[in-house]
Image: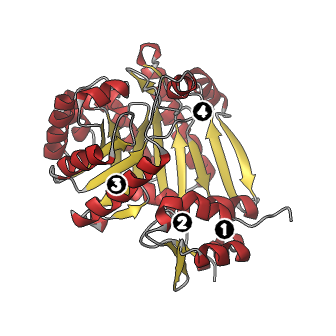
Amino acid sequence: MSPAPARLGLYVHWPYCARICPYCDFNVYKAAHAQPEALLAAMLDDLRHWRDRLGPRTIHSVHFGGGTPSLMEPAAIAAILEHADALFGLAPGCEIGLEANPMEHERFAGIASAGVERMSLGVQALDDASLTRLGRDHDARTGLQALESAQNLFKRVSLDLIYAREHQTPDDWRTELETALGFGTGHMSLYQLTIEPGTAFERKLKRGALAPPTDDAAADMYALTQSVCAAAGLPSYEISNHARSRRDQSVHNRLYWEGEDWIGIGPGAHSRTGGFDSGGREGAAAQRRPDAYIKGVAAGDAHEREQLDAEAELTERLLMGIRLTEEGLDLDRLFARTGLGPDRDGLERMTAQTLITHIGSRLVLTEYGRAFADHVAEALIPDFDA
């Protein structure tokens, strides 16, 4: 039996930020150098190119990320949504989400009127000292003011926080987490701070000027996150994401984790789509610099494309799918898509170590195994060179 047709999502990358955070390794640029009109025109043209390439498809989710897409003019957001609907059609109930900086809270009404119904609000911390160390341009009061505004304007809101920050203890995090849960949001994205290569934080760490919590303290904070959120009615449905109900979960992010299709427009945006004439899954990455992307769209070559073989596709699907804590990885679907399965020795080893369990045709991380998701996924990837 052939696999069911993949659902399609649209990712819109707005690369500009008023300030670049020292922990960020995304493709971002200072807003002072923005080319908003030219970039919008290029993204609209890029959508047309994707429609010509894919043919008729329905879009099930649209996500504006970045960068700081809350810096976009509402008219630009509306123009992209209208163009996507005209070219592809937005499915009934299509999730339309946007990542926002609390500093733009006065713009939220316009963003909502443009068609956004789900907001991911990057509050990141609830105390001023931590926000300063994270390089954020808002204070705690502004973050909470923005949260109140978002909850009044949008159907669904995600409160995004970072833990395992410098000088933070597990007790500090418990207090902050319980405070955050008290605001009653239906979704929380709770990310452990990682020091990414090439970031200002990495340079600071190498100088000895940054002292993040120990690995043991960070592990304690992860375990605490799981237990406190579950007790409050927001269990994890993915390693770092917690929701009060299925309706509160992120439709767009589930497309990534479940290995569905998505197209990306904007500088540096990535795409994954099903086979074309040559068959198989195709990956694409847009030109990273805004000026190169704008020129590339005009020339019809804004995206570098690659055909993924079954081994590469298996690897991606394993790394992403294992992160879903409720459903886990569907082995039947994995085989239908790639003709391959996980490494048998690795599977036996991870099962024996009680990191993963079988539930029907699915592999699901145990509660203990969730803290080692990347290790488990890597163990399940076959050694294709053996």
Spatial separation of the CA atoms under disc 2 and disc 1: 10 Å
Could you tell me which quadrant the C terminus lies in? bottom right
Point out the frontmost of discs 4 and 3: 4
Front residue (pair 265, 190): 190
How would you rate the neighbour count of disc 1 (Cα within 10 Å): few for under 14, some for 14-19, many for 20 or more? many
Q: Of the numbered discs in the image, which one, if any, rests on residue 322?
A: 2
How would you rate the neighbour count of disc 4 (Cα within 10 Å): few for under 14, some for 14-19, many for 20 or more? few
> Label 1 near label 2: C-beta < 8 Å?
yes
Residue matched to label 4: 197
Residue 118 visible in the snapshot: no
Q: Viewed as shown, does residue 64 lie left or right of 386? A: left
Front residue (pair 265, 137): 137
User: x%, y% of residue 296?
Assistant: 64, 28
N-terminal-most mark, 3 or 2: 3
> Label 4 near label 2: C-beta < 8 Å?
no
N-terminal-most mark, 2 or 1: 2
Residue matched to label 3: 95
Q: Give the vertical position of 186 relative to 83 (above or below).
A: below
Among the 4 quarters of the image, the one containing residue 66: top left
N-terminal-most mark, 2 or 4: 4
Q: Of the numbered discs in the image, which one, if any, rests on residue 380?
A: 1
> Callout 1, which amino acid?
Leu
N-terminal-most mark, 4 or 3: 3
Q: Give the vertical position of 199 relative to 361 (above or below).
A: above
